[in-house]
Amino acid sequence: MDTTNTTTEDCGCGGSSTIKTPEPTILSKIINKVFVSESTKNHRLSICKTCDHFDSTFTRCTICGCFLEAKTRLQGFHCALDEIGETPLW
């Protein structure tokens, strides 16, 4: 079973080259549904680090108790400030 897409690209030399790009695997599709991108995780964590409820010793939120290296990576999670009646920052 061929699991690649074939595209033809003009390299500018008068000919063309064929490039095979792999299709996403089932595992990579699952991972993309569970985890956010590295840049999103970094953005979320940088927001947390400026918060008064950030515990820098354990990199955790003192409101919800979550370890933020994990929480900021996961789809479907958000800032816990809403648990104390404030607007979540992410």
Image (cartoon, grey):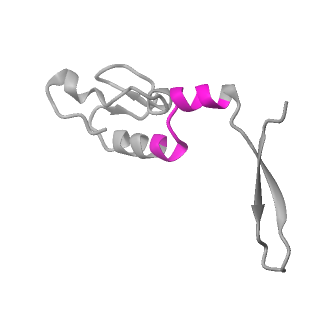
User: Splitting the image into 4 quarters, where does residue 40 fall?
Assistant: top left
Q: Nearer the viewer, residue 12 or 85?
A: 12
Place of residue 75 in the rendered image (x, y in percent of width and height, measured from the top left): 44, 29
Query: On the image, which quarter does residue 30 sit in?
Result: top right
Q: Residue at x 44, y 33 (%)?
A: 72
From the viewer's perspective, is 73 left or right of 24? left
Q: Please tell me which residue lies in front, 24 or 77.
A: 24
Q: Is residue 84 left or right of residue 18?
A: left
Point out the stretch of residues depicted in magenta: 28-41
Q: Nearer the viewer, residue 23 or 76?
A: 23
Q: Is residue 40 magenta?
A: yes
Q: Position of residue 36 (x, y in %)?
A: 50, 36
Locate the N terminus and report the quarter of the image it occupies: top right
- Where residue 44 appears, as percent x and y from the top left, is 40, 41
| Residue 86 place in picture, x, y as percent | 16, 31
| Quarter of the view holding residue 82 | top left
Q: How would you classify the magenta stretch by its main secondary structure? A: helix
Outermost bottom residue = 13
32, 51: nearer the viewer: 32
Image height of 65 relative to 12, above or below: above
